[in-house]
Image (cartoon, helix red, strand yellow):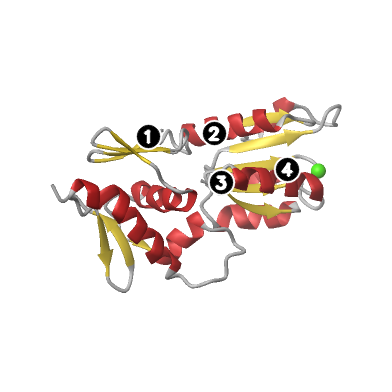
Amino acid sequence: MRVLVVEDEQRLAETLKWGLEADGYTVDLACDGRTGLELAQMNAYQVIVLDVMLPGLSGYWVCSTLRERGVTTPILMLTAKNGEYDEVDALDTGADDFLRKPFSYVVLTARLRALARRGPTGAPAVLMFGDLVLDPARRTCRRADQSITLTTKEFAVLECLLRREGQVVRKLEILEQAWDMAYQGDQNIVEVYVSALRRKVDAPFGRRTIETVRGIGYRLVVDA
Ligand code: CA
């Protein structure tokens, strides 16, 4: 799951990034409103964490602008205790939820999971393709009622393919979803993870679900 954190307090931002990455999220950081606004429109995030008090553009402004521009990504707004604004404003500008500072990390991640489950447009919480079932909130993968253990990156790559069921997904798109912006390496890293996925979700079941579209990327196909 790819998350954008827009927060100008550097220590808090880095702590959040570190913690969320340890939990298997892919995290991009923006330390001001303008960068946050740009990144939120440029990349597909499952959830955005948006601080209200930011240098430049405020979190409220960023949130309402994103909604005006048709970005439907769930937004969790961070509001300051005794701040000048209140939570009603956060919801009025189009945020889906808010959390008052200081907050507990456990509560934050629970809220993020809930928002991701809800999805941008009431998207299904559990992703299914035939008998392959992926639950992003619980981070579980099953096929034919057998549990499959995936690494964080394998999970992210498969989630990306399942969300685009039936369509060809370019390697670069998979990279953008499953790796953060700091990754500067070869796109072919995706091949390594697709091979690993095939060994886990296809081969043991005698299936070929992940099709290579030469020179472009991958597509899920029904092979039954
Ligand atoms: Ca702030």
| Residue 50 visible to an observer of this rendering | yes
Quarter of image, res 52:
top right
Which residue type does callout 4 highlight? Gly
Q: Decide which of tag 3 and tag 2 comes sooner along the chain.
A: 3
Residue in the picture at 31% in, 50% down: 200
Residue beneath disc 3: 25
Q: Are marks 2 and 4 in contact (CB under 8 Å)?
A: no
Q: Decide which of tag 1 and tag 3 comes sooner along the chain.
A: 3
- In the rendered structure, find residue 40 and report the number of the disc placed on it: none
Q: Decide which of tag 2 and tag 4 comes sooner along the chain.
A: 4
Which residue is more in the foreground, 126 or 20? 20
Residue in the picture at 34% in, 47% down: 162
Q: Decide which of tag 4 and tag 3 comes sooner along the chain.
A: 3
Which residue type does callout 2 highlight? Arg
Question: Residue reaching furthest left?
Answer: 224
Q: Position of residue 78 (x, y in %)?
A: 73, 35
Label 1 to label 4, Cα distance in Å?
Answer: 30 Å
Label 1 to label 3, Cα distance in Å?
Answer: 17 Å
Residue beneath disc 1: 126
Q: Are marks 2 and 1 in contact (CB under 8 Å)?
A: no
Residue beneath disc 4: 59
Residue beneath disc 2: 113
Which residue type does callout 1 highlight? Val
Q: Is residue 1 left or right of residue 190?
A: right
Q: Position of residue 111 (x, y in %)?
A: 60, 30
Residue in the picture at 52% in, 42% down: 72
Residue in the picture at 31% in, 74% down: 215
Label 2 to label 1, Cα distance in Å?
Answer: 13 Å
The crowd level at tag 2 (other Cα within 10 Å; few <14, some 14-19, many 20+) is some
